[in-house]
Image (cartoon, coloured by chain):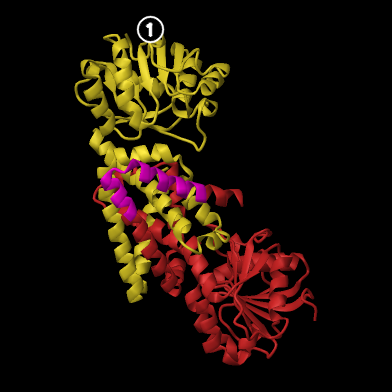
Chain colours: A red, B yellow
Amino acid sequence: MSATAPLKHITLIGVGLIGGSFVLDLKRLGLVEKVTGIDLSRDNLDRALERKVIDAAFTEVCAESMVDADLVLIATPVSTLPHICRAIAPFLRTDTLVSDVGSTKQSALAAFAEYLPDFFANCIAAHPIAGSDRHGALAAQFGLYQDKKLIITPHGRERPGSLERIEALWQAVGARTFRMSAAEHDAVFAAVSHLPHLLAFAFVHEMFDHPDGATYLKFAASGFRDFTRIASSHPAIWTDICMANKRSLLDLLSGVEAQLAVLRGVLEQGDNAALYRYFEEAKNTRDEWLKGQ
Amino acid sequence: MSATAPLKHITLIGVGLIGGSFVLDLKRLGLVEKVTGIDLSRDNLDRALERKVIDAAFTEVCAESMVDADLVLIATPVSTLPHICRAIAPFLRTDTLVSDVGSTKQSALAAFAEYLPDFFANCIAAHPIAGSDRHGALAAQFGLYQDKKLIITPHGRERPGSLERIEALWQAVGARTFRMSAAEHDAVFAAVSHLPHLLAFAFVHEMFDHPDGATYLKFAASGFRDFTRIASSHPAIWTDICMANKRSLLDLLSGVEAQLAVLRGVLEQGDNAALYRYFEEAKNTRDEWLKGQ
């Protein structure tokens, strides 16, 4: 089977923005014949059926939902992966691919290894770098992954061709694919995603805790708005992510604490030249990054 | 003279986005007859003359630049205020109003008191809450202050009617005016502006310092982009602001350090419920703020 041959059946567990947008594009491209959605919310499933994101719907994993599935795609919060792996194990064929879309990859590989040991060679851990402040089946959209990055974190015992098969599907919907180890992935995304979320939550929480916080917020403007946008992210999803990646996150948090200690010292000493240099180094780093986008 | 009678002559010191946009709107409204610009950059002055932001131009404070000025508006980085007050003192009439637009107000009142003691009753400290990532005379634009906030921080010894006069000008260009003490102002803007800038600079600086920072940045996406936008701000301007407001800033920095210590503890203990509650409190605070915008 070629890497781009159409799939007969995808079972999508968690019918939201991420998984829904993926299967919408695969359908449009004729790369999948049938998509079955599994979701805890009947209402969400009905929306997904109406919008033809999925063709059949179930509120729990069962034999019927997985008949002849070529691919089971798990697109639920990262903490649910162990539970879901256990639930799907009885219904997997020997050649069914299992993949996920979670933001932490060491935890994904650990769940695959522990709860799908007989199918580990079919398990591909993946993470598409795309999102939106919208969620649920109604947020699913065509083209979400166009020019976005998709990271695959191989565990080394994948069945031949399986990594390429999953990569080809993501490439078909427009993503640029990368491979790295799960540990490297988790360090990277702790730095550029999980840590900024933690800092944004911490900063807003300081406004929540401060006796004058409500007064302060009356005068917040566009700088505040953009800096704190990610503090409006979903608390449950981010609790999961931060806990699953806490080792990388705690290492980086030490780095930020050290940065703040430097800034404290520079401010207390009134060292204008040092503060200017510090700000300039940060600005240049950010401006260079922006140019590369 | 009524609060909205036209001015004959404004001397604008620092012809950039903030001061330039203010006088552009006053001219359009017929609220000023002549604007003289003073700026260190001849090139910038030429742009401002071409675009009719100003009617006359000087590269330094001199008698001619201030003849019959009703208002001297100082719109330069906050650290330059003492120097400029000293320079303009010989040329002020007894009824010339002096105002500024700086982001720190205790430092502004201190400069007025020390370097313009004989004119202190004419000195009005003000701060328009508007900005852009663009700067210089070419960035000056009509309507910049529409529906923006303008803070006046009275020192209590203003000449009768002078506060109202300055407020009326800002209201004429669309701003909503507020009064508060300079200390309160500095605490408010340390919280909602200066601290986020410091944290954004610190976070990006951690990427600059980290041995794997360059690799990490390759995978930064929209969350990173928005969170770090203010780290592309002008290093000199922000060095000035942070130094001028360092007492308020250091107090708030202690608060953030305490927040990070809480998060570290919660992560280390694996206390999912506490982390969820923390994130939810922050999200709710931010979402409520956004609703009020």
A255 vs B182, nearest the viewer: A255
Question: Is A264 one of the magenta-colored residues?
Answer: yes
The residue singled out by tag 1 in the image is B67
Q: Estimate the x, y position of residue B103 in percent, counting from the top left.
A: 35, 34
Q: Which of the 4 image quadrants contains residue B177? A: top left
Few, some or many residues within 10 Å of mark 1 (<14, 14–19, 20+):
some
Magenta-tinted stretch? A262-285
Q: Is residue B87 left or right of residue A61?
A: left
Query: Can residue A282 be seen in this snapshot?
Result: yes
Residue placed most toward the observer, B138 or B148: B138
Output the chain of dot 1: B
Residue B97 on the magenta span: no
Reply above or below: A28 against B4: below
For the N terminus of chain A, the image quarter is: bottom right
Up the image or down, A252 lies above or below B41; here it is below
> For the residue marked with disc 1, what is the amino acid?
Val
Q: Residue at x 36, y 65 (%)?
A: A254
Q: Look at the magenta stretch and give its main secondary structure.
A: helix
Q: Give the residue displayed 36% in from the left and 76% down from the top.
A: B270
